[in-house]
Image: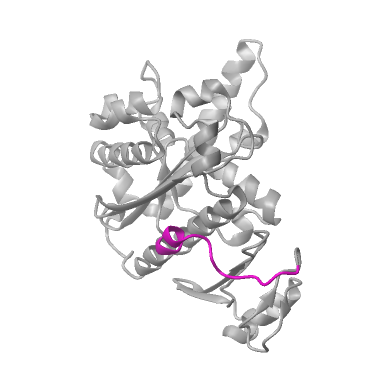
Amino acid sequence: MRVEERYLITGKWFMICCDVCGTVFSQHMNIPWGSRDRAGAVRQIKAAGWTDHSGDGGKVTCPSCDKPAVQEHTEDLNAMHTYIESKTKENDVSEWTQGPLLGFDLETTGTDPRRDVPVSFSFVFYDSGVETHAIDGIINPEVEIPDAVIAVHGITNERAKQDGRELKKTIAGIAYALVASSMANIPVVGMNVSFDLKMIDYLSQKFFGDSLSDRGFKGPVLDVLVIDRFYDKYRKGGRKLIDLCAFYGVDEAEMLHNAQNDVEACVAVLLKQCFKYPEMLSMGLDALYLSEQAWHRDWAENFSKYLISKGRDPLSESDLVWPF
């Protein structure tokens, strides 16, 4: 029952999560206000409505359910946070592919990030292009999974209910890991990863009242689909992950539609893209991330024009913004 301190590249990260109802309070103190020690965290906690019982931040009570709040998710997600933090000071290399990467993917109940929910997640860690370890899990979506979706990823309603983690608590852990990665300037890598980030962002707001941006997420994000669309605009054929695997010579294609396999394939495609388009390395992470935002908007605006020409509705303004 403590306020957890985490040291990242821009300062201290404090977080507590109610183990009873899942309510999360977190504050990244990266500006010089007041005390930046535990006492400062306690002041922030009180301002957010939490009640400090010990005088030193050792115990707090959740304002939502009036139960003791603790900094716990699951053992493997805590291990993930520790790994991310261990890589913070190492992430200072001339070529970003030689530093840490965090692959991320969700399998979900459908294709609408605001209506559907995850049924599994995977984080896969890389150092110098080599996979070091993976953390994944089944999630109980607390809604029925359509048969058509089950046919794609193979996670049945029975399995999700029996083996799945609690949805709200798992979303808190995933969101925290993504923000920790961003604070450490470790790229989040995926295929059409804006969909996955939008879903977590929306659920974070729904369950806890704050978005990924509110928590401090600011990228970088590396999306193999956005990169492929920019560098090979006029290539005919599909651009699903299986298509990109075939085009870039990645062998994992027959194993897709499992979250971990999808992540491994995405990172393999990304590294092949870096070899094919070496300017991705020379521009650096920040410039590449900003470029992807412009590349996506350019593609989305052109695709909207195409839709209009076919008598269909254009993309919404929110669809023009990437990653979310």
> For the N terminus, which image quadrant?
bottom right
> For the C terminus, which image quadrant?
top right
Residue at image location 26% in from the left, 30% down from the top: 248
Q: Relative to 87, is 153 above or below?
A: above
Q: Quick check: is 249 in the magenta stretch?
A: no
Q: Relative to 268, is 56 above or below?
A: below
Q: Tell me where residue 116 appears, x and y as whole percent.
A: 62, 35
Given residues 291 and 255, the one toward you in this image is 255
Q: Quadrant of residue 280?
A: top left
Given residues 284 and 89, the one toward you in this image is 89
Q: Tell me where residue 51 appears, x and y as whole percent.
A: 74, 78
Residue at image location 64% in from the left, 70% down from the top: 69
**Magenta residues, start to end:** 66-79
Q: Tell me where residue 321 appears, x and y as whole percent.
A: 59, 39
Q: How is the image coloured?
A: one colour
Q: Quadrant of residue 67?
A: bottom right
